[in-house]
């Protein structure tokens, strides 16, 4: 019997956020991201005189808005438009979030005739993931792009010391470019650099952190593809800033007293419903998952345990691209890895270097991140050697694929994180 995270009753409110699916993304033109990945085209208009942007191109999972306006005069005042099998009014809007290439054929149905308007094709792509570092000397941040598992160009988003501590990276304004959040330990203020084409764009003050609150994780808990910040108060309660905005909403508080022996170990979508969930670990090594929808816990599970003095939870990522996030563990004394598929101990696998049993990455390498560096949809592992060198393990689920040493970033540069790390 596991100890509960919260004493007292745990009423589960299901489905409260079920009706928030139709979130429209940015309709304005979007600039290229920090490494020159092209901007998406995510709005297309269909009229009986033609289609604007018949081929849209967006990052996988991002919204595309299809608008149509069809006029044939009095001849067919009762006409309907058929979009991808659905019969709808002559004027309308549809927002889709494709995760693969898809097309929608539009026709007009009037009286007994059917007239083709054309086909809207949507191509999806994935962002390249790049490294964010900061000089230990003058504190300048730097972006190192990674292409084909090799380090490419380096960009200085701002030619100066930000004078702030790195807090997190993520997309805080929904333009699908990852931004950088900084923390002022003196004032508690969070400031976001909105990034565009590798440069610092707008600087946005996000608000002030209540004294003592600590950032636990970033994630997308309300499923709108904009990064949320998850905090914990000194008394153990969780708070969330939606999309980086300091609403400070109580998060999964069920009225009991939080147990400080449970600690947040990460976040990820362990049930593939599009909403990130919260991963917990107890002092005895037990693991718990709170399945979230918005701020509401819609379920919970105790997927297993691992000796806390032997195994550390390192990252949460989707290694086999099945839509369910997986837990990546590393054993302290020999560097062995374990992956819990779907976050479940009974689905554990044990990847080894070159798939040679018992072969581990040297303990001189720290496991610092996960991202899909080779764009196969599957998360890969980023390592950093004590001398500053980075290496990547391309993973095929729990199988080792290949290892690349990508760049000898000087050890005088501090690793901050990955831009566009979500696989
Ligand atoms: Ca969000
Ligand atoms: Ca989920
Ligand atoms: Ca998975
Ligand atoms: Ca990959």
Image (spheres, grey):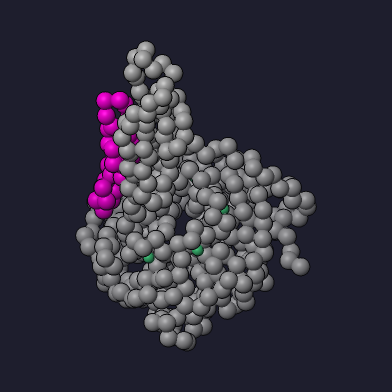
Where residue 203 sits: x, y (%)?
Answer: 35, 41
Q: Is residue 328 above or below residue 103?
A: below
Q: Specify the quadrant that holds the N terminus.
A: bottom right
Can residue 285 be seen by looking at this rendering?
A: no
Residue at image location 64% in from the left, 62% down from the top: 288
Q: Spot the residue most to the right.
A: 8
Q: Specify the quadrant that holds the C terminus.
A: bottom left
Q: Spot the residue most to the front.
A: 112
Number of numbered discs visible in the structure rendering: 0
Where residue 343 sits: x, y (%)?
Answer: 57, 65
Residue at image location 69% in from the left, 55% down from the top: 258
Ligand 4 positioned in quadrant: bottom left
Where residue 21 sits: x, y (%)?
Answer: 52, 39
Q: Is residue 358 above or below residue 115?
A: below
Residue at image location 42% in from the left, 73% down from the top: 366
Decide which of 341, 383 is in the foreground and name it: 341
Residue 55 drawn in magenta: yes
Q: Quadrant of residue 271?
A: bottom right
Residue range highlighted in magenta: 29-57
Residue at image location 32% in from the left, 38% down from the top: 119
């Amino acid at each position: 019997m596991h100890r509960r995270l919260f004493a007292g009753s745990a009423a589960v409110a299901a489905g409260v956020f079920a009706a928030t699916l139709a979130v429209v993304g940015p309709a304005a033109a979007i600039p290229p991201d920090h490494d020159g990945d092209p901007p998406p085209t995510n709005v297309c208009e269909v009229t009986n005189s033609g289609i604007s942007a018949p081929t849209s191109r967006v990052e996988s999972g991002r919204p595309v808005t299809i608008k149509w306006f069809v006029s044939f005069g009095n001849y067919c005042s009762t006409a309907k438009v058929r979009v991808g099998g659905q019969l709808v009014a002559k004027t309308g809007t549809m927002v889709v979030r494709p995760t693969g290439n898809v097309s929608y054929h539009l026709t007009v149905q009037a009286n007994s005739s059917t007239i083709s308007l054309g086909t809207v094709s949507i191509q999806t792509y994935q962002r390249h993931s790049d490294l964010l570092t900061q000089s230990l000397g003058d504190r300048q941040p730097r972006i190192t792009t990674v292409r084909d598992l090799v380090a490419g160009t380096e960009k200085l988003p701002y030619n100066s010391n930000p004078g702030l501590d790195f807090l997190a990276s993520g997309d805080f304004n929904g333009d699908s470019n990852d931004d950088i959040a900084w923390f002022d330990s003196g004032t508690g203020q969070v400031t976001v650099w909105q990034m565009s084409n590798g440069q610092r764009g707008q600087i946005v003050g996000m608000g002030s952190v209540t004294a003592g609150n600590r950032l636990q994780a970033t994630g997308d808990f309300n499923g709108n593809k904009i990064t949320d910040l998850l905090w914990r108060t000194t008394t153990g309660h969780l708070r969330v800033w939606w999309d980086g905005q300091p609403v400070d909403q109580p998060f999964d508080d069920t009225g009991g007293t939080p147990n400080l022996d449970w600690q947040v170990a990460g976040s990820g979508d362990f049930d593939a419903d599009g909403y990130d969930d919260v991963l917990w670990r107890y002092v005895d090594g037990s693991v718990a998952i709170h399945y979230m929808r918005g701020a509401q816990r819609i379920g919970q599970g105790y997927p297993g345990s691992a000796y806390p003095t032997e195994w550390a939870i390192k990252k949460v990522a989707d290694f086999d691209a099945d839509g369910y996030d997986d837990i990546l563990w590393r054993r302290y004394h020999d560097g062995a890895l374990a992956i819990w598929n779907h976050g479940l101990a009974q689905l554990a696998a044990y990847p080894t270097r070159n798939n040679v049993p018992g072969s581990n990455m040297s303990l001189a390498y720290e496991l610092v991140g996960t991202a899909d560096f080779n764009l196969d949809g599957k998360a890969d592992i980023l390592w950093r050697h004590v001398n500053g060198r980075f290496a990547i393990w391309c993973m095929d689920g729990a199988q080792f694929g290949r290892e690349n040493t990508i760049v000898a970033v000087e050890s005088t540069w501090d690793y901050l994180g990955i831009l566009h790390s979500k696989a």
